[in-house]
Amino acid sequence: LGVLATMDEADEALRRSFDRIFGAAVEAVAPF
């Protein structure tokens, strides 16, 4: 259970950071 919870938290953090990086890349490529 502890391992599962940790993996879930890591997945959530990874997804959040990916969204931030992807959003920044989209804004850089398409400023409009």
Image: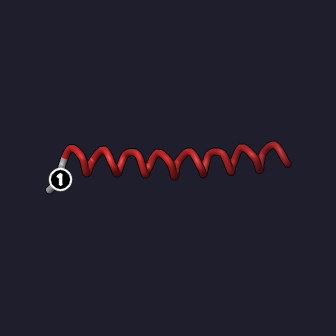
Residue identifier under label 1: 31
Residue nearest the viewer, comparing 10 with 31 = 31
User: Where is residue 4, by image quadrant?
Assistant: top right
| Residue 31 location (% of width, % of height) | 17, 53
Task: Determine whether the residue tagged by mark 1 lies in a helix, strand or loop.
Answer: loop
How many badges with numbers are in the image?
1
Which residue extends farthest right? 1
| Residue 23 location (% of width, % of height) | 35, 51
Residue nearest the viewer, comparing 6 with 4 = 6
Residue that appears at 59% across and 50% down: 13
| Residue 32 location (% of width, % of height) | 14, 56
Residue that appears at 25% across and 51% down: 27
Q: Does 29 sit left or right of 13 as displayed?
A: left
Which residue extends farthest left? 32
| Mark 1 Cα-neighbour bin, 10 Å: few <14, some 14–19, many ≥20 | few
Which residue extends farthest bottom? 32
Colouring: secondary structure
| Residue 14 location (% of width, % of height) | 56, 45
Q: Does 4 sit left or right of 9 as displayed?
A: right
Residue that appears at 51% across and 52% down: 16
Q: Amino acid at mark 1?
A: Pro
Q: Does 3 sit left or right of 15 as displayed?
A: right
